[in-house]
Amino acid sequence: MDVYEAVASRRAVRAFADRPVPRETLERVLSAAAWAPSGSNIQPWHVYVLTGAPLAELKKRAGERLAAGDPWDEPEYEQYPPVLKSPYRERRSAFGEQRYGALGIAREDLEARQRAAAGNWDCFGAPAALFCYVDRDMGRPQWSDLGMFLQTVMLLLRAEGLHSCPQMAWAKFHRTVAEIVSPPEGLILFCGMSIGFEDVTERAPRTTRAPLGETVTFVDGP
C-alpha cells in the first residue's frame, strides 16, 4: 500500500471484528512511528497499549460508570472552543448529520445519539487500544507533535491492513484509564485510539472534506 492509498483509506472506523492484532505488528508500527517529526526531537508522546484482559477490564469499568450515570471526569484540556465560529461550526454540524444519519438517528433523538456514542467505551469492539499522554508542562507546539505521531501511527496501521479510531472521548474518563495503566504524575491523557480489523458488515460511509479552495491558498511566484 503506497502513502496516497493509506491516506485515502484511513478513516475513523467504529466497528471492529473480533480478531486479535498480533503484538509484533503493534511493535513494528510503533517502532516506525517513532520517526514522526517533533520539535527539537523531544518526542513528547507517552503511549500505553492495551490488549487482552487489561483492555477488557478498562471496557468493563468504563461501561459500569456509564451505566451508573457517573459524570465525566473534570477536563484537563479544552477539546473544542466554547463557541465554534464559521466555517468550523458548519463542518462539525455536517459531521454529526453524516454520522448519525448513516445510523438512521434523527438530529433531535438525543438518547439514540448517546447510545451510539457509548460505543467509545467499548472501543467499538476493537481488540487493541492505545492511550497517548503528554507531560502537562508541554506547550501547544508539543501537542501538535502528538498529532503528527498519531497520524503516522494510523497510516502505518493501514499499511498493515488495520484500521483505527482516534478518540478524545477517553479524556472524559481519564481517571478510569489511569486505574489501568498507572501513568506517572504529571501526565495528561490526550486521547485513546481503538485499533483492529474493520468489521466490514457494518461499514459506514466516509465523512466528507472541505474543498481545497476553502483550506489552501497558493501564493505563486513568476
Image (cartoon, grey):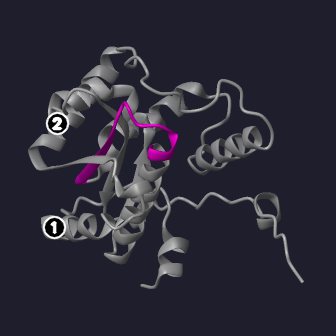
Give me the residue at 68% from left, 34% from top. Answer: 107
> Which is more toward the observer, 196 or 181?
181
Q: Which amino acid, by three-letter code, is at mark 1?
A: Pro
- Percent from the top left, x then y, of residue 166? 42, 49
Relative to 108, say whether 17 is above or below: below
Tell me the quarter of the image containing the N terminus: bottom left
Q: Name the residue: 42% across, 24% down.
A: 76
Residue for point 33% across, 53% down: 43
For the C terminus, give its image quadrant.
bottom right
Query: Looking at the image, which is closer to me, 218 or 50?
Result: 218
Q: Which residue is mark 2?
A: 181
Residue 157 seen in the current view = yes
Residue type for callout 2 = Val
SS label for mark 2: helix
Q: Is residue 118 depicted above or below 76 in this figure?
A: below
Closer to the camera: disc 1 or disc 2?
2
Circle 1 is placed at which residue position? 22
Q: Find out whether residue 135 is within the magenta segment.
A: yes
Location of residue 108 with respect to 19 vertically, above or below: above
The magenta-colored residue range is: 127-142
Q: Which residue occupies the foreground of this view, 60 or 165?
A: 165
For the residue pair 58 and 202, the one nearer the viewer reads as 58
What's the CA distance linking mark 1 and mark 2?
A: 20 Å
Residue 72, image x, y percentages? 40, 19
| Total numbered badges shown on the rendered structure | 2
